[in-house]
Amino acid sequence: MAERVVNVDEIEHMINLFGSYDENIEALQSEYGVTVVNRDGDIRISGGEENVDKAARAVESLLAMSRRGERIGSQNMRYVFSLVDEGLEGELPKLSEDGICVTLKGRIVKPKTLGQKRYVDAIRNNTIVLGVGPAGTGKTYLAVAMAVKAFREHEVSRVILTRPAVEAGEKLGFLPGDLQNKVDPYLRPLYDALLEMLGAENFKRQLERGSIEVAPLAYMRGRTLDDSFIILDEAQNTTPEQMKMFLTRLGFGSKIVITGDVTQIDLPEAKRSGLVEAMKVLKNVGDISINRFTDKDVVRHKLVSDIIRAYEKYYERGSGHKNG
């Protein structure tokens, strides 16, 4: 039986570590099969030697997060466990260095995983970036945050957000209203992210000035987009022809971020995905970065990660098929 003692310097960090009704500590005990108790301001961990070592490293990492002002919850608990298993928990402090912008409510937008950190760095350092991975990994949200940052710092004069208007079980023609009303549901996630960072009045003002443009992909044809930060969202639903058209809109002083999930293609079976093809065509082109997210980068409910892994296993067994 081994034992490790981790000192906790402030009571608020102890409270944060244990969580509501000790739920965080219960998760820690369940993960590593150890016993954890609070005794006179110290965390005492006992159990098998290897598990005690891992649990102590997890506790130290979680306390470091608490000291940086982060609330400890189930999502970052799971992420710390995964990093400890890989021996990568020492990389966590890098995440605190990378505030991107501040939302209207004063929340600092920053990467929450190392995969997100690599993605943000890639956007800084490349002209074109592809962010490919499952739902909930922050692909679109972080891209919008980087666009807002570039706009606020006058690195670009326009932010252009676009998506292909591809139906997932619902026909555009049956939706009410004019063309803008019909495509708005497809663009809603982009609106929501911008509203959170800019506020409704500022967003509307920039929209009226043309400094911010949110439009379906078809509106990009025939244009050259200079001095702009351009985001193509849900790119798995582009055709190869649409993707080529979009990429060749790039003008001087501009940056492009393309996001998508190749497991959620809504194109007809006979159609190839432009995103899947672009990942192959562009993989060795300079100043283009292809970033792949995994279920470890999911920052939504735990079940989202579980669902993604379940589907991956299902397809690996050959029980299903994927378009693309």
Image (cartoon, helix red, strand yellow):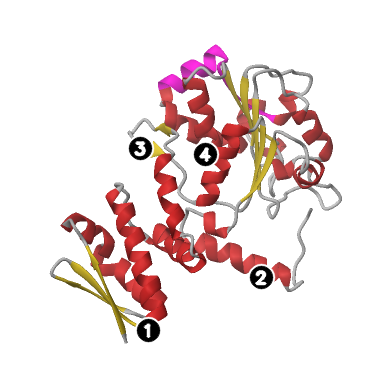
Is 262 above or below relative to 106?
Answer: below
Name the element at disc 3: loop
Which residue bears the numbered disc 2?
313
Separation (CA) of disc 2 from disc 1: 31 Å
Amino acid beneath label 2: Lys
User: Mark on residue 107?
Assistant: 3
Which residue bears the numbered disc 1?
48
Separation (CA) of disc 4 from disc 1: 40 Å
Disc 2 vs disc 1: which is toward the camera?
1
Q: Quadrant of residue 55?
A: bottom left
Separation (CA) of disc 2 from disc 4: 28 Å
Crowd tier of the residue under label 3, counting other residues whose Cα lies within 10 Å: few below 14, some 14–19, many 20 or above: few
Q: Where's residue 33, x and y in %?
A: 38, 81
Residue furthest to the bottom in view is: 1
Which residue bears the numbered disc 4?
142
Bounds of the magenta segment: 201-216
Amino acid beneath label 3: Arg
Crowd tier of the residue under label 4, counting other residues whose Cα lies within 10 Å: few below 14, some 14–19, many 20 or above: many
Disc 1 vs disc 3: which is toward the camera?
1
Q: Closer to the N terminus: mark 4 or mark 3? A: 3
Q: Where's residue 184, x and y in %?
A: 59, 32
Amino acid beneath label 1: Gly
Name the element at disc 1: loop
Q: Residue at x 73, y 74 (%)?
A: 317
